Amino acid sequence: MRRRITVAMVAMVAIALVLAGAVTFGATIHAARADNRRQLVSEATGLTRAVQREADTARPADPALSLRTIIRALKAPLRLEGGVVVALDADGMLFDPAAVGRAPRLPKGLTPADLRIPSLRALQTVSGNIGGLVYVAAPYRTVVRIGTQNRQLVEVVVLTRRSPTGLSAAGPWFSGAAAAIILATVVVADRLGRRLLRPLHAAQTTTARIAAGDLDARVPASSGMDPELADLGASVNTMADALARARTSERMLLLSVSHELRTPLTSIRGFAEAIEDGATPDTTRAAATIVAQSQRLERLVGDLLDLAKLDARQFDLHLGVVDLCDIADTTAGGFGPQAAQLGLDLAVQCDPSSTVAVHADGDRLAQVIANLVENALSFARSSVVVGAANSGGCPVLWVDDDGPGISSGDLPRVFERLYSSRPESTRAVGSGLGLAIVSELVTAMGGHVRAESPLLGAGGGTRMVVTFPQDP
């Protein structure tokens, strides 16, 4: 890639130099031709005026002869390519005034058509250029003695000159400067390529290591790095951090799930072996324990399946307007016997005369409330309170417990899978995945869930708050 960058930059500079040189040389040649043309017109008209003055004073027999002599003398100093004097007859035909009736010899490169005869007959100076050859034809009226008669003629001074292009002088300088510029471009492009590609190579190497499983690999940061490349490196490092956290969370989830599975399986196996060996006097109690632990396993597996469906977005929501108070009262009421067995008070705070309408899936909402109540029952010391109301026009659900509370640093993580920041509870209520399922379901229904701890005016306690939008 560095070679491609170098080649591309050199090609761009070379093209720019060629275009700039072509435009510059073209403008220079055009200006030189125009200036040369003006000089040649001035010189030709000066010669014709001198001849006319001589004709008026000395009246030579052949003014063209003296004019040709002057042209030959001035050809080298004036850098003339060619110079002749021709005459026009009454019919507009050109002839040699030194030999009447003989066609004139025009300078090389010119034809009679180039001289524009009608303009010359009107005594108008004609000039132009043919390629690099600049020419001028300056007419003047004079009297020439032909034989024994004086005859009035229009004679024309025709001068030509090669226009200097400046290429011979400027070409070597331009070539040298172009070579120096291209060499400097190669050096700059090579250094720029190295500077650009070094962070890219580092990012490529780091991503390859990450893909191979080395999540500790990071793109090194440099103070002189371009902002865009620094952002690329930071993005790769952020991705690596996220993958490392995800792998850590996955490992913790596997460890936690393994622990959660092992505990009921140990109980089931122990009581089943005791029944098989006849070592337990109370088989009914042993069977009840096996049933309870089997239900716990079933709930854990069910929650894992729910989380898998939530991650894959393969669950269905049947949204509609439901009464939050009614669902909260019914769902929380189902935990009354379990709360009583644990020695806890379970209360529902809802105004029976008011309706808290929420746009949600009733079954999924009941699952959210059930998971929140199970979590509260796991840590409450004496009571759990479930409430629902309209707050600021938005439906709000909350579940309070008077447990030990959650530290402020752990509040944002309580909805992670199998994460627990509170002291281990002796109560086995729920699977440990309930709050993660709550977060996924509430988000899918357009709501928001948060944890607040400690409760105002209490030494501990936790409140789980679910807020639904007013106009979903």
Image: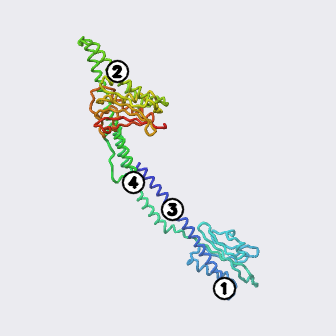
User: Crowdedness of circle 3 by 10 Å Cα count: few (<14), some, many (20+)?
Assistant: few
The first of marks 4 and 2 along the sequence is 4
Residue type pointed to by label 2: Gln
Identify the residue position indicated by label 1 in the image.
53
Q: Position of residue 421 (x, y in %)?
A: 29, 35
Residue type pointed to by label 4: Leu
Residue 130 in which image quadrant: bottom right
Compared to residue 61, the image places residue 132 above or below, namely above
Identify the residue position indicated by label 3 in the image.
20
SS for callout 1: helix
CA gap between label 2 and label 1 equals 133 Å
CA gap between label 2 and label 3 equals 85 Å
Whether residue 94 is visible:
yes
CB under 8 Å between discs 2 and 3: no
Q: Farthest residue in the front direction?
A: 353
Instruction: Give the number of the mark in front: 1 or 4.
Output: 4
User: Crowdedness of circle 2 by 10 Å Cα count: few (<14), some, many (20+)?
Assistant: few
The first of marks 2 and 3 along the sequence is 3
CA gap between label 1 and label 4 equals 73 Å
CB under 8 Å between discs 1 and 3: no
CA gap between label 4 and label 2 equals 67 Å
| 457, 26: nearer the viewer | 457
CA gap between label 1 and label 3 equals 49 Å
Q: Farthest residue in the bottom direction?
A: 57
Residue type pointed to by label 1: Arg
Residue type pointed to by label 3: Ala
User: Crowdedness of circle 1 by 10 Å Cα count: few (<14), some, many (20+)?
Assistant: few
Identify the residue position indicated by label 2 in the image.
295
Instruction: Give the number of the mark in front: 2 or 3.
Output: 2
Is 55 situated left or right of 265 in this image? right
SS for callout 2: helix
CA gap between label 3 and label 4 equals 24 Å
